[in-house]
Structure formats: structure tokens, C-alpha cells
Image: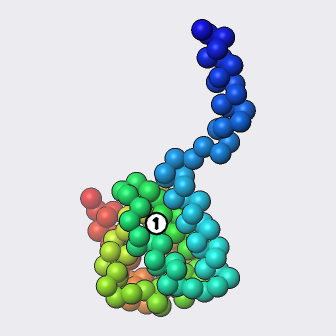
Amino acid sequence: MKKVIFIFSSLLLFFGCSEAVDSIGEANIKTQNVFRAYETSGDADAAYAWLFARHGEAPGHQVFITLVEWSTKHPDKFKALLEKLPQEHRTSFVVRYAFAVTDSGQDNDYKDAFGGLTDRIFTEISLKLKLIGKK
């Protein structure tokens, strides 16, 4: 029996594990792809459709963590994206984005990229970050 388990485990490791991704990993990969496409197309509608789709609690949070990572590496493209933020999603976006910044430990990256900006959306995010930090 041990030999069968060893052989099965070896085959699974060799053939299957490199492609195995859970829902959180899948959300990360798909979000990266969405924002790679946004970089070239500038299609904010597609990006927002992905951000505000229902992904489940943990995968949905991963979507925003990946967005934070992307945004701090592409601040100009992120600013352009935010100019087209649908008003009905503004509050939800600010809360989810700020929580993803703090929960993923990207506070310093966010401050380096956006700390001095006074645009309304960045002011709202900064205020939410301060509130989260006090908890």
C-alpha cells in the first residue's frame, strides 16, 4: 500500500501540481491578466467589470490585493482608471482597496506611489487607511 501511495504521490507531483491553483491563486492570475489587458487597451469598463464581479470572499479580496500591487507599479495607469470609477462603486472601492493595502502590508508602497496626491479619491483612500490603522 505504501508503494502505491508513493507512486501516486510522485505522479501527482510530477504531472499535476505545477498546474494546481486554488481559487485565491486563480483570482490573482486572472486579475493580473485583466490589468495587463487594461495597460494596452485602456478599457476601464472591462477592468471594473472584473473588480466588481462576485468572486467570493477570499478570492474577491485577492482581486483587490493584486490591484494594489499593480497600482503601485503603474501609478499613472491607476490614476487614469480611477478617473472612470463608476460613482455607484466609489465607497465600496475605497473600502476594499484600503483594506487590501493594509492587509497585504503594502502601506509603504501605496504611500510612495500616491502619498502626496490630493485628488478626492486618494484623499478618501488615505482617510480610510488612517481609520483602519487605528483599529
Instruction: State whether residue 35 is above or below residue 121.
Output: above
Q: How many residues crowd around disc 1 within 10 Å: few (fewer than 14), some, or many (20 or more)?
A: many
Q: Is residue 110 visible?
A: yes
Instruction: State whether residue 4 is above or below residue 8.
Output: above
- The amino acid type found where label 1 is placed reads Phe
Q: Which of 85 and 102 is in front in this view?
A: 85
Instruction: State whether residue 80 is above or below residue 105.
Output: below
Residue under the point 31% across and 64% down = 132
Question: Residue 86 placed where, x, y %?
Answer: 39, 87
Q: Please, which residue is most extreme toward the left here?
A: 135
Instruction: State whether residue 107 is above or below residue 2.
Output: below
Question: Residue 89 placed where, x, y %?
Answer: 34, 81
Location of mark 1 (residue)? 64
Quadrant position of residue 37: bottom right
Quadrant location of the C terminus? bottom left
Q: For this view, does 33 lie left or right of residue 135? A: right
